[in-house]
Image (cartoon, grey):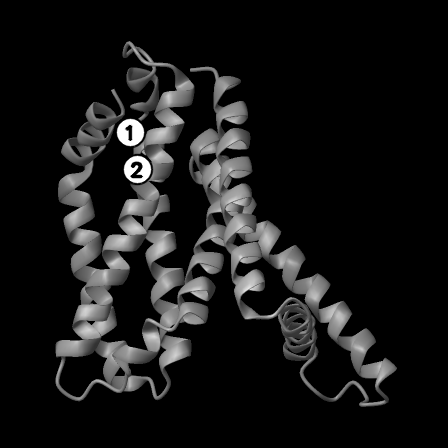
Amino acid sequence: MLRKLLHREWILNRTNVALMFAIYAAFQIYMVISIDSTRPWVVMATLYAAFLTTALFVREDKFRSTWWACTLPVTRLELIRARYIAAWWMVVTAFIGSVLLAALVPGSNVIVSEIFNPWTLLIAAALTTGIFVWVLPFTIRFGMLGLMIFLIGGQIVGAGLLVLGRMINRGSNAGTGGRPIRTALAAIGDAILGVREALTPVPFAIAVIVTLLVVNWLSYRFAAYMFRRREF
């Protein structure tokens, strides 16, 4: 049944997915020529790919076709499982395509060998997970309104980082003339590096992978919980 649900997602959205991938490819061609470092490119490519998935759920909400899916002989839990798998499939496919473009486009400034560094791939997986945790449950439940919830949540997180950065600046006697959000992100990065050094690389990588799997599972269960209470 899962295979049939994934096939349904493809049949209903293939034209839209092809158009989104074409735009994504054009953007990546521009990025691999313009950017001067591999890791920022990975961050941009991953974020863009993760946000592509929201278009499918918003589109379904726009045409009010979700109720029709719920009339199929499947549970709502199976529908959500198929949508999470389809979302990850889109991200992985888009990311692989962007790597091929980085390798083949003349004048590319992206070093392909650096992309396959395990830590770089973990960063990409963590970014995708972070987007999915915030976006998918609410977009599946509320459609476009769910995307607005994400944007508002992003503003709250940004405000929190701003406050944290200013507190760190004051604590370090650095003043408030710097960049508080960058300071806060640097402090978080330093904390993560401290944990990595304490655990040594392999246990830390295993811990990160397990954490990402657990977070994705919790996000999937929360989305299913939200969707089961949706009325049409």
SS for callout 2: helix
Amino acid at dot 1: Phe
Does residue 148 appear anywhere in the picture?
no
The residue sitting at 37% across, 22% down in the picture is 78
Circle on res. 59:
2
In-image side of 78 versus 33 (left or right): right
SS for callout 1: loop
Dot 2 crowding, Cα within 10 Å, few <14, some 14–19, many 20+: some
In the rendered image of this protein, does residue 198 appear above or below residue 16? below
Task: List the residue tagged with mark 1.
Answer: 63
Residue 121 lies, in percent from the top left, at: 40, 65
Residue 210 lies, in percent from the top left, at: 53, 49
Amino acid at dot 2: Arg
Does residue 53 appear anywhere in the picture?
yes
The residue sitting at 38% across, 54% down in the picture is 50
Residue 136 lies, in percent from the top left, at: 45, 40
The residue sitting at 41% across, 77% down in the picture is 40
> Which residue is nearer to you in this view: 168 or 118?
118
Tell me if label 1 and label 2 are in contact, CB under 8 Å: yes
In-image side of 4 versus 71 (left or right): left
The residue sitting at 49% across, 26% down in the picture is 224
Residue 48: quadrant of the picture:
bottom left
In-image side of 187 versus 202 (left or right): right
Residue 147 lies, in percent from the top left, at: 47, 44
Q: In which quadrant of the rendered image does the N terminus lie?
A: top left
In-image side of 63 versus 230 (left or right): left
Between the residue at mark 1 and the residue at mark 2, the CA separation in whole angstroms equals 6 Å
